[in-house]
Image (tube, grey):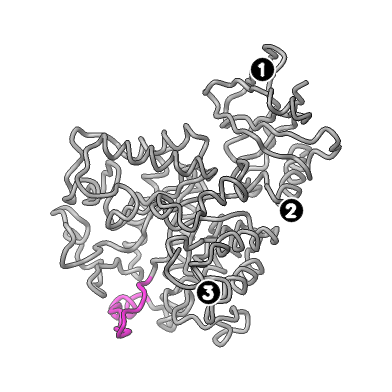
Amino acid sequence: MKNIVLTIIFIIFFFVSKAQPVYEFRGVWVASVVNIDWPSSKGLSNEQQKAEFIQLLNLHQQNRMNTVIVQIRPVADALYPSPYEPWSEYLTGKQGVAPNPLYDPLEFMINETHKRGMEFHAWVNPYRAVFNTITSSIAPNHITKTHPHWFITYNHQKIFNPGLPEVRNYVTKIVQDIVARYDIDAIHMDDYFYPYPDKNHSPFHDRKAFEKYGNNLSKDDWRRSNCDSIIKQLHQAIQAIKPYVKFGISPFGVWRNKSKDSIGSNTNAGVTNYDDLYANILLWLKEGWIDYVTPQLYWERGHKLCDYDTLLAWWNNYTYGKHLYIGHGIYRAGTTAGWKNKKELPEQIQMLRKYNTTQGSIYFSSKTFESNPNGWNDSLRNNYYAYPALPPPMPWIDSVMPTSPKIEKANKYEYFVTTSNTNNIKGFAVFTLNSSDESYLENARLEQFIVLGNDNKIDTKQWKNNKRKIFVSTVSRGNNISEWIELK
């Protein structure tokens, strides 16, 4: 119990608004669909794919991100050897064709990510099955060919019918396989539940399923209940296999407009989660079916219909104790007057850090960072993310404080850090304080994270020369930290 209490105290202090928080989620979406981010084009050699991903990771590590959210199942296909779904055309150019020579891109990406002390969140699109019915490559064993009655064609895409129990069971089976076989840190899903309305607001033809399974609900409530069911089912499936694997959703940025619901946001969005995508995100948070939510707040501050500040404040009122990471539309840099403003992204970060119920950010998307838009890579490296941060722990998943590290002094400045129990340990955190600071919690600065198994040497020369106190703690897989050991 003492360990649990101490951990919670650490979390409370580190989440208080700080210029350089010790705990802050800093993630980047890496989209594979139509080769948005990775791989950059179809048909690259294995070595080219690997080199691109390493380059991508190194860029984000330099920006001091601590998580990548990689799309591994964009259209009922796989960027890994799946027993159920064909290889993605975005890897080899033709769906169902494996990399040659055969390798496992997902295993490679996870290993490279963890080597750098970063988390890997496996991004899965639940219901999109064919991106474009005219141009997409479809393998003979693709699920749309073997179970065509599960799908509805809408706006030139094929979408799983969320109203069918067999569809929900199938998607759950896919997620169970990923969680069981791979060392991922989270399952992540985006905003594609029921499809966004097309320009003509054409109907989604699910009448037969509604007549069979509607259970006297209105069609809208039935559709929402279908989305509720898959989220609850996935939550239970993940928990049954690896309880430490997190489950996060990145919904469209507006739950409901206030004009439709008294608790909705003061916005005028043309589409909302609740009314159009049938995703009742607040229920999922309230019931504890998801561990974090990342609303896609891709609008700028002062936007006439969907103001960033308004939505940021609104989402902070409805986290129900779960984590809130803000989705930033960095891809919009330079597209409008607001997004040409070099202060836009920095001010968004400043605003979210004012809330102790917001724990960080995710950026869409990876490729945008390659051009250093508006100099924002520099802003992150030199200012807002000048020091590393750990992803925030989730006490409802893991609140156990790990054992403190063992320290061996090599010379005046160098130390080696180890632990007697490596189970559930991912590394060591090095903190410093000004010599005059008495409080560890409020004034700590995370200087370095050392991945377990790497060279566990700490060179303290720069900090000692700057008259700073130095401390080391063990970090668990759940990002809980041990009591600190001072290096003297």
Which residue is pictured at 20% across the width and 61% down the height? 144
The quarter of the picture where the C terminus appears is: top right
Of tags 2 and 3, the one toward the viewer is 2
- Residue 128 magenta: no
Q: Position of residue 51 (x, y in %)?
A: 32, 36
Bounds of the magenta segment = 194-213
Left/right placement of residue 150 relative to residue 256 reads left
Circle 1 Cα neighbour tier, 10 Å, few/some/many (<14 / 14–19 / ≥20): some
Looking at the rendered structure, the secondary structure element under dot 2 is loop
Spatial CA distance of label 1 from label 2 is 32 Å
Residue for badge 2:
16
- Residue type, mark 1 in image: Glu
Between tags 1 and 2, which lies in front? 1
Q: Which mark is residue 432?
A: none
Please tell me whether residue 234 is drawn above or below residue 278 in the rendered image: above
298 sits left or right of 443 in the view? left
Kindly identify which residue carries mark 3. Answer: 255
Task: Indicate the position of residue 380 as horizontal and vertical percent values.
Answer: 56, 50
Instruction: Tell me how far mark 3 sits from mark 1, CA to CA.
Output: 52 Å
Mark 3 or mark 1: which comes first in sequence? 3
Closer to the camera in the image, 269 or 73:
269
Closest to the observer: 357 or 394? 357
Give above or below for 323 relative to 341. above
Location of mark 1 (residue): 414
